[in-house]
Image: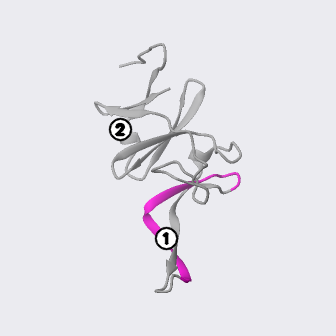
Amino acid sequence: MGARCSAAAVRWDAGASADVPERGRLVVDAGETSVGIFRIDGALHAYENRCAHAGGPICQGLMVPRVVELLDERRAIIGSAFDETDLNIACPWHGAEYSIRTGRHAGKPAIALRRIPVEEVGGRIYVIA
């Protein structure tokens, strides 16, 4: 289909839908911007490949389940477990973790990755930058 231009945005063909399987990722260049595209529960989530903490290549980091604290009836911590339904991405530089669904930092929700618009049409994935 090619890129569609407007004064505000350009539509970049990032690849085939099959290039981003469930719980998978694809990192592409959309012009001057490196973008990581992830698929979780069928939905695409895309972020600038730049950690909000120190600028590292966040989208190339390890995908890990979120760690949750286990509490007893008095709400005292008795351990921890992995939440396999909530994947995070960990920055390869310093380990800062962000939710793939929201882009928010795991410990400081005010810190977030820059979300990039993405759409899926006709078996192709497009980044709007």
**How far is the residue under mark 2 from the one under mark 1?**
28 Å
Residue 102 x, y percent position in the rendering: 48, 49
**Which residue is nearer to you in this view: 3 or 78?**
78
How crowded is the residue under tag 2: few (<14 C-alpha within 10 Å), some, or many (20+)?
some
Residue 51 x, y percent position in the rendering: 64, 45
Residue 83 counted in the magenta span:
yes
* Amino acid identity at mark 1: Phe
How crowded is the residue under tag 1: few (<14 C-alpha within 10 Å), some, or many (20+)?
few
Question: Is residue 124 visible to us here?
Answer: no
| Secondary structure mostly taken by the magenta-highlighted segment of the chain | strand
**Which residue is nearer to you in this view: 20 or 115?**
115
- Which residue range is magenta in the image? 76-94
Q: In this view, does 75 lie above or below 128?
A: below
* Amino acid identity at mark 2: Ser
Q: Name the residue under label 1.
A: 82
Q: Name the residue under label 2.
A: 17
Name the secondary structure under disc 2. Answer: helix
Determine contact: label 2, label 1, CB under 8 Å. Answer: no
Q: In this view, does 8 lie above or below 29?
A: above
Q: Give the residue displayed 35% in from the left and 19% down from the top.
A: 1
Q: Give the residue displayed 43% in from the left and 65% down from the top.
A: 84
Question: Is residue 108 visible to us here?
Answer: yes
